[in-house]
Amino acid sequence: MRFAFGRLRVVLTYVGTVLFVLGLLLLVPFILSFMFAGAARQDVRAGTFMIPLFVSIVLGSACRWQLENWRGPRRIGRPEAMLICVIGWLVISALGAIPFSYHLRISYLDAYFEAMSGFTTTGITMLHGLDVMPASLLFWRSMTQWIGGLGILTFFLLIVFQGGISYGLFGAESHKVSGRRIAPGMWNTLRILWLIYLLYTAVIAGGLLLCGLSPFDSICHSFTCLSTGGYSTHDASIAYYQGAGYTHYVTIEYIIIFGMWAGGTNFLIHYRLIKGQVRALWDSDEIRMWWIVLGISLVLVLGSRLHMLHASAEADNPGASFRHSLFQVLSIATTTGYGTRDIASDYFTPLARQVFLVLMLIGGCAGSTGGGLKVARIVILWKLMVRQIRKVLKPDSSVDLLLVDRKQVDAQEVYRTAALFFAWVFLLLFGALTTAAFSAQGAFESASGMFSSLGNIGPCYISVQDMARLSPVIKLVYIAGMLAGRLEIVPVLMLFSGRAWQ
């Protein structure tokens, strides 16, 4: 088998360009570290951001230099695009982990876990003591999720647009269900996506600021809300604001609910809403299924909560129960992971915890920042099942097409959906068995850990303290699960394909 050094050179060249963009991003927390220097508990160690910034530039220059002296082919095909995508995410997470490891003096594996969890917008955290952590480090932590929300490479393409490679890289990173593009041309699509992303980020930040949050907290939570990442600047997550006595904590929670819904909904819907097409909220199979999933989940979670209160004669504010149920349903369904109540606590019934597990599998809509299997694929699988039942009841000669939005679904899309679903089930079982084998976690907790990682969700039924104490083997499996979930498995599998490197 011949190893394609030319392919590797091309891949490393574009990864090097991505590293330059990472260096630009690291300038923001680097400048913030000087702005907050001398303030109480805000000093960071000198090399916290300088080291990864310097390494990003040096490695980026080296990668660019090696191609300038290369006389071979420089074509970017699908294999190259997928390899650029996977290697780029691995390298950026490796450099993005340095600030956590260097300043907090935690193991590099835990820091890499934190960075990968950030960039993939998973939100599983190894860190505690967030309330007293330096602002520049918290900002970097939130920023990793904001950049990862629409994809690191989409940001790269926006900054250093190169038309010849844009479609391949965008497709590799956004390996989603086939659907309509927002606008003709990849550049227009990227520009509109990021404009919508910026608009919603500003709206959420402005709303939180009006509710009494500091500018710092408002910006950080707008970053991690719309990206459906879920990193907070407080250990108690969004519950902090009620506990801290914020007057408008209820409004804060509803603003976050809106932001999570926006992040988990197909951005084509937002584009159509901005253009005044209100019917976009119900005129497609995916959005109707989205409302059905959210509605049924809310009824089950809230109903079981109210039934538990009635059975125990415990007093509670029905409005609070509704708000907390709605918040956690949106938080899990959109794979954001914020909390106003711990999903593993007795506040939620066993039925509610099972509902959360199902939502972890489904995830948000295609074309959103949410993770999971995606609602659009659930639509395809549901209609495929209904179609097979109908075929049993009809003559063999009858023709029964698989239609989504009154259009026939291409056979390749069906095959890809089925293959991805099988891969999801296989990885979930593998992660659950690994967790059970290398830890003292129970079966339910072990399954939830991989559900959370592969679905890019964050919350699971393993506590933050127990997560930090897990075996390195489990952490590595979860890191692989987070990347596979974010890139939707196929590009990650390319790393292990001999033909990809020929």
Image (cartoon, helix red, strand yellow):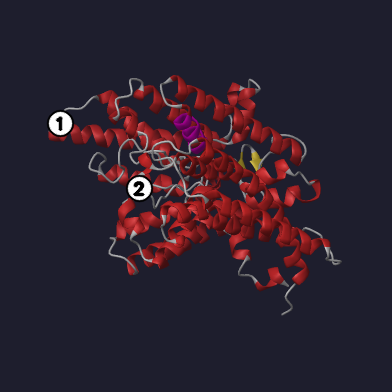
Q: How many marks?
A: 2
Secondary structure of the residue carrying numbered label 1: loop
Secondary structure of the residue carrying numbered label 2: loop
Measured from the top left, where is residue 319 in percent x and y?
29, 23
In this view of the protein, which residue sits in the foreground, 365 or 261? 261
Give, as a three-letter code, the residue at label 1: Glu
Give, as a three-letter code, the residue at label 2: His
Measured from the top left, where is residue 194 in percent x and y?
65, 35
Reply above or below: 260 against 441.
Answer: above
Q: Residue at x 53, y 56 (%)?
A: 483
Q: Is residue 320 left or right of residue 3?
A: left
For residue 381, say whether it is visible.
no
Taken as a whole, is the magenta stretch helix, strand or loop?
helix
Q: In which quarter of the image is the N terminus?
A: bottom right
Q: Is residue 129 magenta?
A: no
Which mark, residue 128? 2
* Residue sitting at the far bottom: 1
Measured from the top left, where is residue 379 in percent x and y?
53, 44
Instruction: Give the residue number, with chain letter if any, for mark 1.
Output: 314
Q: Give the range drawn in magenta.
A: 216-226
In this view of the protein, which residue sits in the foreground, 5 or 141? 141
Q: Residue at x 55, y 58 (%)?
A: 94
Number of residues whose C-alpha sits closer than 10 Å to that of mark 2, classed few (under 14), some (14–19) or many (20 or more): some
Q: Residue at x 55, y 55 (%)?
A: 93
Q: Quadrant of residue 189?
A: top right
* Residue sitting at the far right: 71
Q: Residue at x 68, y 32 (%)?
A: 192
